[in-house]
Amino acid sequence: MEHKIYPNVSIGKNAVIEDYVIIGVPPRGKKAGELLTVIGDNAVIRSHTVIYAGNRIGNDFQTGHHVLVREENEIGNQVSIGTSSVVEHHVKMGNNVRIHSQAFVPEMSILEDGAWIGPNAVITNAAYPLSPNVKHELKGAIVKKNAKVGANATLLPGITIGENSLVGAGAVVTKDVPPNKVVAGNPAKIINDVSNLPYGDRR
């Protein structure tokens, strides 16, 4: 099977689209081609990736295998989404965002320029799942510029991870993290300053 491209999909120059990729899937309540889908130049979209309609994606976009990107996201340049990761709808990503394998990014999340999401990290957006107004009260995390979220970390709804900060592997983040801090544990607590780490302020 080759890839399937729905109507009203614009893909830039030099794209590599592997077998079993589907691009432009209409979400519930929309017809095929109703929402414009744009993917910039030099994309590498690996097999079994599914990208829904209405996404606006910049240049140099890459996916691993079996990636799901839901509808109407805004994704910048040089963004990479690793194998088996899921990005829900109405997510905003800046440039140079890296999402590793098997991560989950729910709707209403914001990942600013240079944000780094480790493997199996989970961002949540519903404080009270299945509550009557849950769909109207969703709040994803905000991961600020150059912040890093370690493997298997969990971010609770509405949390802000400050610029350049680092969330340790396996941490459960229940409140905002200030800029330039290292947090770890459950619940996560500040344990260090990024300036004291071996890489200091290097990106």
Image (cartoon, rainbow, N blue to C red):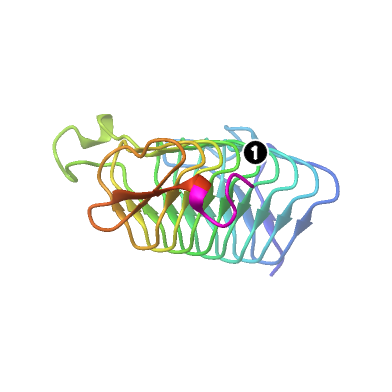
Dominant secondary-structure state across the stretch colored magenta: loop
How far from the left and from the top, in percent, is residue 38?
68, 37
At a point 65% along the width and 38% down the height, the residue shown is 95
Indicate left or right for 148 with 155 as reference.
right
Residue 67, placed above or below residue 23: below
Q: Is 133 displayed left or right of 164 in the figure?
A: left
Kindly indicate the quadrant of the structure image that contains residue 39: top right
Q: Nearer the viewer, residue 126 or 14?
A: 126
Q: In the image, which residues are magenta?
A: 196-203
Local secondary structure at mark 1: loop
Residue at x 63%, y 33% (from the top left corner): 36
Residue 177 percent across, percent down from the top left: 35, 39
- Residue 113 left/right relative to 15: left
Residue at 26 percent of width and 35 percent of height: 135
Q: Amino acid at mark 1?
A: Asn
User: Whole-percent x and y of residue 151?
Assistant: 43, 63
Image location of residue 193, percent across then percent down: 44, 46
* Residue nearer the viewer, 115 or 86: 115
Mark 1, Cα crowd under 10 Å, few <14 / some 14-19 / many 20+, is many
Furthest-front residue in this view:
196
Q: Which residue is mark 1?
A: 95
- Residue 201 within the segment the image draws in magenta: yes
Vertical arrangement, residue 133 with respect to residue 48, above or below: above
Q: Residue furthest bottom?
A: 1
In this rendering, is residue 28 above or below 1?
A: above
As for residue 68 lying within the magenta part, the answer is: no
